[in-house]
Image (cartoon, helix red, strand yellow):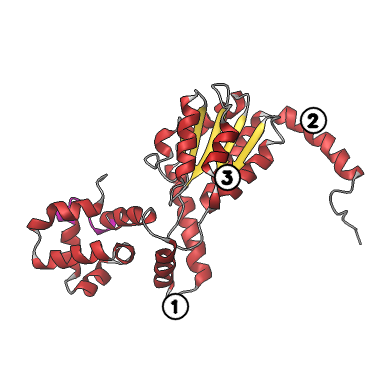
């Protein structure tokens, strides 16, 4: 269901029963909390039965409560302020073990990513990188480390890699102004989506460059202006962005590109090993 759940609630409000009005009122006023409640907990909070909550979801047009909850969570990802995310995260954690909660959440994001990542789009992205004259990597704010990580490894394989991170919109456009149809642009964006990254991707695509988006959905602002979308699930509900799954997608991309550049990489690292040895770049292991 593509329509915003808040719009659905407003549209169907005249037909709601008293109990449904209470559910709708709570979701409208506290969607940041409702999105992470079970049907039973939501019912108790507003004073209706769990079955009333489930029927309410179906009456709205969802397959069931889990589908409505997913719609609420997707909406929440792009609406919550940082303060709200802290409040929601604390509410979710409660007395639970933080380590287990975070690790299990990350594992779930990896599972979802493995299921949703199009292998066809992945192969197309690898080919676009291999055929490009120049590679531009866009990642600002919290995803800047992803851009830098990818750039670090692609620099071993290509001579013309440009990482654009941590820049204002004006500075970003100054760095990509010469992008053209011979280039490939790899952009990262997750909720709350960076407007400057979306605008930059739109500009790059208008020049004829191939744009690869690493984002949480093909329907995200970035996903809608890309030639190839690599879906990676992220969790922005807590204060800290979970970038475990996006980093795994980057790892897969690096491995796939490296496999196609094996001969060139062999020569590069042969030369580097001599340099690293001569200039003591790495600590030498002392055998006892």
Q: Which mark is residue 167?
A: 3
The answer to which quarter of the image holds residue 148 is top right
Q: As rendered, which of 42 and 135 lies closer to the eye?
A: 135
| Vertical order, 5 against 168 (above or below) | below
| Vertical order, 181 against 227 (above or below) | above
Pointer 1 and pointer 3: residues touching (CB < 8 Å)?
no
Q: Which mark is residue 95?
A: 1
> Which comes before the other along the chain, label 1 or label 3?
1
Pointer 1 and pointer 2: residues touching (CB < 8 Å)?
no
Q: Where does the image place residue 276, in percent across and percent down from the top left? A: 86, 43
> Which comes before the other along the chain, label 2 or label 3?
3
Q: Seen in the image, is 83 located left or right of residue 253?
A: left
User: Residue lying furthest front in this view?
Assistant: 170
Residue at 74% over, 32% down: 265
Residue at the disc numbered 2 = 267
The answer to which quarter of the image holds residue 261 is top right
| Vertical order, 131 against 288 (above or below) | above
Q: How many marks?
A: 3
Label 1 Cα crowd, 10 Å radius (few <14 / some 14-19 / many 20+): few
Q: Secondary structure at mark 1?
A: loop
Residue at 49% over, 41% down: 197
Give the magenta range.
58-66
Q: How far apart are labels 2 and 3 at the CA level?
A: 34 Å
Front disc: 2 or 3: 3
| Vertical order, 58 against 114 (above or below) | below
């Amino acid at each position: 269901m593509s329509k915003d759940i808040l719009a659905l609630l407003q549209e169907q409000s005249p037909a709601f029963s008293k109990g449904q009005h209470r559910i709708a009122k709570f979701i409208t006023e506290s969607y940041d909390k409702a999105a992470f409640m079970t049907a039973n907990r939501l019912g108790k909070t507003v004073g209706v039965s769990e079955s009333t909550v489930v029927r309410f979801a179906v009456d709205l047009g969802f397959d069931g409560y889990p589908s409505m909850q997913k719609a609420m969570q997707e909406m929440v990802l792009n609406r919550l302020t940082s303060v709200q995310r802290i409040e929601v995260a604390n509410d979710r954690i409660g007395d639970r073990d933080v380590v287990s909660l975070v690790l299990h959440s990350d594992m779930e994001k990896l599972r979802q990513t493995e299921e949703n990542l199009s292998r066809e789009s992945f192969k197309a992205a690898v080919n676009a990188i291999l055929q490009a004259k120049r590679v531009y990597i866009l990642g600002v704010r919290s995803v800047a480390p992803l851009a830098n990580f990818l750039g670090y490894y692609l620099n071993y394989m290509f001579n013309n890699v440009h990482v654009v991170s941590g820049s204002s919109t004006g500075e970003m456009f100054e760095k990509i102004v010469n992008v053209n149809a011979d280039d490939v642009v790899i952009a990262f964006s997750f909720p709350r989506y960076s407007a400057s990254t979306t605008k930059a991707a739109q500009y790059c695509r208008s020049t004829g460059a191939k744009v690869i988006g690493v984002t949480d959905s093909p329907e995200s602002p970035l996903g809608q202006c890309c030639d190839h979308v690599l879906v990676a699930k992220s969790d922005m509900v807590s204060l800290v962005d979970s970038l475990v799954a996006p980093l795994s997608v980057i790892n897969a991309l690096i491995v796939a590109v490296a496999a196609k550049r094996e001969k060139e990489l062999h020569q590069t690292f042969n030369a580097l090993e001599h340099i690293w040895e001569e200039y003591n770049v790495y600590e030498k292991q002392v055998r006892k």
